[in-house]
Image (cartoon, rainbow, N blue to C red):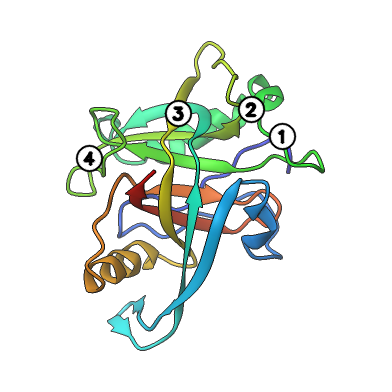
């Protein structure tokens, strides 16, 4: 659905991916060129977080580099209370026509990406405090020169090397964090939610190195 946004996985590890508005069909690689991901590779991580804990199953962990990009969206914070992320997406969806013309498009004219971008309260794009306290921007990737309309906020996300995982259930965050810990990889910034508009699939992007 081209004239609405979609929410992905909330950063909080106990929260499962919410339903989105786009049909599922293809993997993220459909979006890679449009996202300007300059390099990526796949890793198989043999742990999956289930209801009873970690089990021995292969979870695909992918690694990529993405240069700095712009997201324009509706901003809120954990101080706004439980359910604030869902409220932000409702607000963003109901007013999407105000930013639709600013959205970055691929060669076919499709919106490049829907982001639930995150930052600590200092706005330096560090991880949420205790992974539970911080800022959230429910929005769409936009052209670099785009200016946020009244009532919208523009963030410029720094360039990072990321690992990213598909958000198939509520364990994606915990599994990816365990992968980082097991491989002694520090988290270099705030985690972001991403929805590929062409496939409807939800992912979580974990910064591991600032460019």
Residue located at (52% from left, 68% from top): 41
- For the residues labelled 2 and 3, the Cα–Cα distance comes to 19 Å
- For the residues labelled 1 and 2, the Cα–Cα distance comes to 6 Å
At numbered mark 4, what does the secondary structure look like: helix, strand or loop? loop
Q: Which residue carries the number 1 mark? A: 3
- For the residues labelled 3 and 4, the Cα–Cα distance comes to 20 Å
Q: Pick whichever of labels 3 and 4 is earlier in the sequence.
A: 4
In percent of width and height, residue 184 lies at 22, 67
The reply to whether discs 1 and 2 touch (Cβ–Cβ < 8 Å) is yes
Q: Quadrant of residue 84?
A: top left
Q: Quadrant of residue 135?
A: top left
Q: Which residue carries the number 2 mark? A: 96
Q: Nearer the viewer, residue 41 or 118?
A: 41
Mark 4 nearby-residue class (10 Å; few <14, some 14–19, many ≥20): some
**Residue 167 vertical position relative to residue 160 in the rendered view, above or below:** below
User: In this image, 96 relative to 110: left or right?
Assistant: left
Looking at the image, the residue that sits furthest to the bottom is 56
User: In this image, 186 relative to 33: left or right?
Assistant: left
Q: Pick whichever of labels 2 and 4 is earlier in the sequence.
A: 2
Residue 133, numbered label: 4
Q: Which residue carries the number 3 mark? A: 156
The reply to whether discs 4 and 1 touch (Cβ–Cβ < 8 Å) is no
- For the residues labelled 2 and 4, the Cα–Cα distance comes to 26 Å
Q: Pick whichever of labels 1 and 3 is earlier in the sequence.
A: 1
In percent of width and height, residue 52 lies at 28, 81
Residue located at (29% from left, 30% from top): 80
């Amino acid at each position: 659905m081209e004239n609405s946004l979609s929410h992905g996985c909330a950063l909080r590890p106990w929260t499962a991916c919410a339903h989105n508005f786009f049909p599922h069909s293809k993997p993220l690689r459909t979006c890679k060129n449009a996202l300007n991901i300059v390099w990526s590779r796949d890793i198989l991580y043999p742990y999956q977080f289930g209801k009873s804990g970690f089990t021995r199953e292969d979870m695909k962990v992918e690694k990529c580099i993405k240069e700095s990009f712009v997201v324009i969206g509706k901003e809120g914070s954990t101080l706004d209370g439980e359910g604030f992320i869902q409220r932000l997406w409702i607000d963003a969806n109901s007013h999407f026509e105000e930013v639709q013309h600013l959205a970055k498009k691929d060669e076919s004219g499709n919106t490049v990406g829907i982001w639930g971008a995150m930052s600590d309260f200092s706005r330096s794009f560090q991880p949420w405090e205790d992974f539970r306290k911080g800022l959230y921007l429910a929005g769409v990737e936009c052209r670099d020169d785009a200016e946020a309309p009244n009532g919208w906020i523009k963030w410029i996300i720094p360039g990072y090397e990321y690992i990213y995982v598909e958000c198939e259930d509520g364990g994606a965050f915990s599994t990816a964090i365990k992968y980082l810990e097991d491989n002694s990889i520090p988290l270099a910034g705030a985690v972001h939610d991403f929805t590929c508009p062409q496939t409807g699939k939800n992912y979580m992007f974990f910064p591991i190195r600032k460019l």
